[in-house]
Image (tube, rainbow, N blue to C red):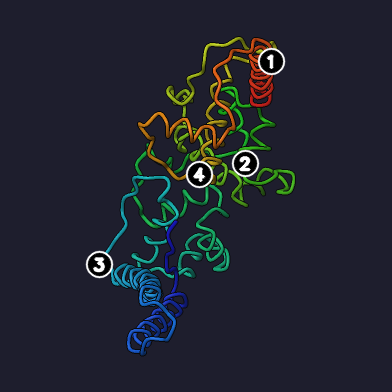
Amino acid sequence: MEAVIKNERQYRITKTQAEKFETAIREMENAPPKKGVPSKLRQAQVDALRSQWTELQEQIKEYELLRSGKRRVLQLDSFADLPRALIQARIASGMSQEDLAERLGTKPQQVQRYEATDYLGASLSRVSEVVRVLGIQVQEHVFLPGGEFSLNILFKRLSSVGLDREFVRRRLLPRPLESAGTEEEREEQGVVLEGVESLHRIFGWLPPDLFGSSTLQLQAAASATGRFKLPARVRETGLGAYVIYAHYLALLVLQAWPTPSRKALSTNWKEVRKNILDEYGELTFEFRESASRGLTQARHGVYTSRLGFLCA
């Protein structure tokens, strides 16, 4: 979530930072060129400062509009925007963090912690209460105000699509449940909400999907699997969910991997041959049956081990 000014203290600090950036930009633009420093490097430094100054100015402007009541947040259409909308709605309603804490019957420090962590430290029941207090209209396909949220319900719903309870605990929830105490304490610490955030990123499910009465569905395209024989210990009904999880992990790896530079392919066969020889040392189309058989067996072993790992 983008940075948001959440209270008057942060507002004053952000204004001070913006003024410092503005002063630094002005000084760099008015200073005589330094010997040995290229003009493009100098301009890049100024542009970087101006970019950060602009971002701070946008945060200040947004907070001032919300505080003045000129911008109100009354309807929420995306679950991903929920934390930001809760903070904006509080500011737009004229409530301080202390005022909201009083309405919720909790301490101001608790509300400060909620907003500092974008409400990941709050339970879904608490978030539902904040939505009600602030008068935000949330579409039912995004959130279920007043719904029943618990880890037991979440585990049961996920088991219906084949996701093992222990797998959910170890891989899909953001932190070990053993360190969170009783179920009520875990919910108060926001484990359920964090789990919903994680499931939304991986599977696209929203709270109404996870806690509603309709059948929990997997995305058909993402869960499509190849036609191959499964090991005896693999449950076919639960394979789709694990395929989506594996696909999500693969995308994370792909995003973290540096993008290789692209080169145009030559249409000159002599140049292509030279490039292959330079890279691999030889160019031959000789068929080696033993090597082919070994490669096939190796691939089969890799696929089998990977499938067993994902579906265990």
- Which one is in front in this view, the residue at disc 2 or the one at disc 1? 1
**Direction from residue 132 to residue 195 in the image, left or right:** right
**Direction from residue 311 to residue 213 in the image, left or right:** left
Give the amino acid at mark 3.
Answer: Lys
| Front residue of 109 and 299 | 299
Residue under numbered circle 1: 294
**Which numbered disc, 3 or 4, marks the residue that appears first in the sequence?**
3
Q: Distance between the residues labelled 3 and 4?
A: 39 Å
Give coordinates of residue 212: x percent, y percent: 47, 31
Give the amino acid at mark 1.
Answer: Gly
Residue under numbered circle 3: 70
Q: Distance between the residues labelled 1 and 3?
A: 71 Å
Q: Distance between the residues labelled 2 and 1?
A: 41 Å
Residue under numbered circle 4: 255
Identify which residue is drawn at 37% across, 88% down.
Answer: 27
- Which one is in front in this view, the residue at disc 2 or the one at disc 3? 2
Give coordinates of residue 227: x percent, y percent: 53, 11
**Which numbered disc, 4 or 2, marks the residue that appears first in the sequence?**
2
| Front residue of 11 and 148 | 11
- Which one is in front in this view, the residue at disc 4 or the one at disc 2? 4
Give the amino acid at mark 2.
Answer: Leu
Q: Can you tell which quarter of the image residue 268 is in?
A: top left
Residue 211 seen in the current view: no
- Which one is in front in this view, the residue at disc 1 or the one at disc 3? 1
Residue under numbered circle 2: 173
144 relative to 219, above or below: below
